[in-house]
Structure formats: structure tokens, C-alpha cells
Image: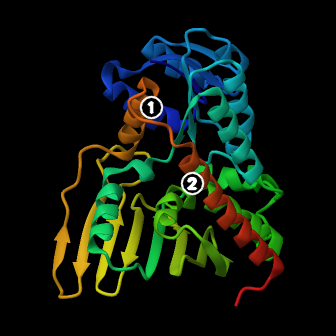
């Protein structure tokens, strides 16, 4: 299957191109387009692909069967609809699928009506570690009491750029955003939720699909958030902090019942280090660590994409839409809570 990549940033270079290469003959990179940076040529030449800038040349390329959209979220709706209109057979779109409910509904509807395969690049949702964790919790049979996502990352310029360039805030050259302004702080947290928490919100939705209320939501300086909400009777906590220095990171989901705690630790971002690691702590004091898979979520999602294009696995448009709407609803509710200044 011939793939055209819209986007030539670090995600394409460090994640998707190496993954496609590992999958051998399943995919061929036919075309890479950048947004004007000039990076496409450097990525395309080693794999024998064409390169261009902008969207038009790639979408008009008859050698491109499927389009991988790895661009900023604000352009996803427009690019998906353009790919459908161009007659492409399949679309792989990096998360988030869309940033509004209306956009999510529009792109899913367009793909469904045209019979276009649609895949959202949510690597945590396809990680074998998540599959193990989900199976353990479902087989255990006890209701979940809480879910927590603890996220500590080294400084990463792309997160800062997403906030400064993507929101109605001053850029770094004009000073730091005034996070004392509730609306500014709320906008930053909203963007962080749809850019980072979105990795794990589909897993949370699996167990806690009905959002009930936001219990607290705060911007955490210098760059992070603390959010708590209730969904389907389960307490959910999302915490992010940006580490001041050093390469260490922590990306952990914790699921708790009355007599069990399960920790799912994902590898650091932008590395291929196998699946997440699952550790189960039982009420009697015993601990079980499940074997990790050498396959990571990036490889698993591209394998599934290939199966959907081959027709051996159906496209679940309903689940795609539900997984896209849930983060938007959480982020919008957090923004409303913080903007109103009603945090306890």
C-alpha cells in the first residue's frame, strides 16, 4: 500500500517512518509533503519517495493510495475532507482527529459515506500493554473506583509551541502568557488535554464513558495541569508536570478497585522500546508483573491500519467518533470550569 505523509516533523521522522520500515512490504512511502519547512526532501530521498510542500501535489498524486495526516490539529478537518474528495482509499490521522465536536462528526461522516478507511494514530490505545491491562481488569470483575494518569515529561519545545502558537496568548518573544488570567490558564490546559491527555482518554472512556462533572481543574506552573472529574461513577485524575531538566520521564496509568491496583507504565515518548509494562498489586500484598511485548503501540496501530485497508478488519466508525468526542467534551468542560473561576 502506497502511503503519502502530510507532515515532515519529528513524529514522522522518529516514529512513523521507522515503524513503516519495520513492517516490511506492507507499506511503501510514496510521497512526503511538508508545510513549507523544506524537511520533506531530507525524509523522502532515503526512502525513494517524492517530496513537495503543501497539500495539493500529494493529494493529486495517483501513486498515493492512503494519506497519513501528521500536521497540527487545526488542519485535520480540512485535510481529511480534502483527502476524501481526492478519492484516497484510506486516511491515517494523528490524534486528535478534530478539535471540535462538529469537526469530528463531519470527518467521520464523510469517511463513512465514501467508504474511506479511517484510522486515528492513538498509539497508547493500540499498545499491547493496554490490551493486557484491560483484560486483567475485565477478568477481575470488580468495579473500578478510580483511574489516574500521572505524566512527567522533560521539557519539549513542541508542547510549548503548541500553546504559544495555538492559542490566543502572547508568544515567547512577547513574554510568557499571563496564567493568572483564568481564561488564559484555561486555554493552556484545554490544549494540553487535547494534545497530551488525549493519549489515554480513550482508555479511560472504555471504563468511564459518561462524563458527569469536573471536580477540579488547575494550571500547574511552570507548565502542567491537575484535573479531576467523575465519569460513570469513577473518580478520574489527570496530572501533568514538565520536568525542569533531565531525560527521565514517567507516563503511568493507575486503575484501582477495592482489592487491586494495576499500574501501566508506558515507554518515554519518541522511542521504540516495546509495549507498556503492566504491574498488578493485589490486596493480599502480592505483586505480578506481566511480560512486556517487543511490539509497541506505533507498530500495532499501523498493522491494524493495514488490516483495515486489506478488508480483513472492519472500520468501527462509531468507536472512532466516540473516542474523538470524549477528549473534546472533557477539555471543553475543563475550560468552562476554569474560565468561570469556580474551582473548589
Q: Which residue is mark 1?
A: 308
Q: Is label 2 in a helix, a strand or a loop? A: helix
Query: Where does the image place residue 69, in percent across and percent down from the top left?
Result: 60, 33
Residue that carries the numbered disc 2 in the rendered image: 323
Quarter location, residue 120: top right
Q: Is residue 63 visible?
A: yes
Q: Give the residue at x 40% y 67%.
A: 252
For the N terminus, the quadrant is top left
Q: Is residue 148 above or below residue 62?
A: below
- Compared across the picture, whether 130 is left or right of 136 comes to right
Specify whether 221 is left or right of 245: right
Q: Up-down: is 77 above or below 166?
A: above
**Vertical side of 3 occupied by 248: above or below:** below
Residue 242 in the image: state x and y as whole percent: 54, 65
How far apart marks 2 and 1 lie (CA) works out to 18 Å
Report crowding for label 2: few under 14, some 14 to 19, many 20 or more residues within 10 A (C-alpha).
many
Amino acid at each position: 500500500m502506497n502511503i503519502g505523509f502530510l507532515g515532515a516533523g519529528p513524529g514522522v521522522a522518529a516514529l512513523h517512518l521507522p515503524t513503516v520500515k519495520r513492517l516490511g512490504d506492507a507499506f511503501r512511502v510514496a510521497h512526503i509533503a511538508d508545510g513549507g519547512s523544506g524537511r520533506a526532501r531530507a525524509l523522502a530521498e532515503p526512502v525513494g519517495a517524492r517530496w513537495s510542500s503543501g497539500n495539493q501535489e500529494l493529494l493529486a498524486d495517483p501513486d498515493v493510495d492512503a494519506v497519513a495526516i501528521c500536521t497540527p490539529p487545526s488542519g485535520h478537518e480540512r485535510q481529511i475532507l480534502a483527502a476524501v474528495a481526492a478519492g484516497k482509499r484510506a486516511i491515517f490521522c494523528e490524534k486528535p482527529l478534530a478539535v471540535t465536536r462538529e469537526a469530528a462528526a463531519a470527518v467521520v461522516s464523510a469517511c463513512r459515506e465514501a467508504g474511506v478507511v479511517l484510522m486515528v494514530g492513538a498509539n497508547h490505545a493500540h499498545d499491547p500493554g493496554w490490551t493486557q491491562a484491560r483484560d486483567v481488569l475485565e477478568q477481575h470483575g470488580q468495579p473500578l473506583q478510580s483511574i489516574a494518569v500521572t505524566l512527567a515529561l522533560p521539557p519539549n519545545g513542541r508542547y510549548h509551541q503548541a500553546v504559544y502558537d495555538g492559542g490566543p496568548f502572547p508568544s515567547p518573544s512577547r513574554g510568557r502568557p499571563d496564567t493568572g488570567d483564568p481564561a488564559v490558564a484555561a486555554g493552556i490546559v484545554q490544549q494540553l488535554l487535547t494534545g497530551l491527555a488525549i493519549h489515554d482518554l480513550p482508555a479511560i472512556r472504555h471504563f468511564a464513558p459518561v462524563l458527569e462533572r469536573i471536580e477540579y481543574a488547575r494550571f500547574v506552573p511552570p507548565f502542567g495541569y491537575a484535573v479531576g472529574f467523575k465519569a460513570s461513577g469513577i473518580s478520574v485524575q489527570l496530572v501533568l508536570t514538565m520536568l525542569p531538566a533531565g531525560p527521565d520521564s514517567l507516563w503511568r496509568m493507575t486503575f484501582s478497585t477495592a482489592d487491586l491496583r494495576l499500574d501501566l507504565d508506558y515507554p518515554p515518548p519518541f522511542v521504540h522500546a516495546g509495549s507498556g509494562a503492566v504491574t498488578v498489586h493485589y490486596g493480599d500484598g502480592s505483586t505480578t508483573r506481566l511480560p512486556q511485548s517487543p511490539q509497541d503501540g506505533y507498530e500495532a496501530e499501523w498493522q491494524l491500519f493495514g488490516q483495515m485497508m486489506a478488508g480483513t478488519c472492519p472500520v468501527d466508525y462509531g468507536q472512532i467518533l466516540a473516542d474523538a468526542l470524549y477528549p473534546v467534551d472533557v477539555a471543553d468542560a475543563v475550560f468552562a470550569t476554569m474560565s468561570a473561576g469556580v474551582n473548589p
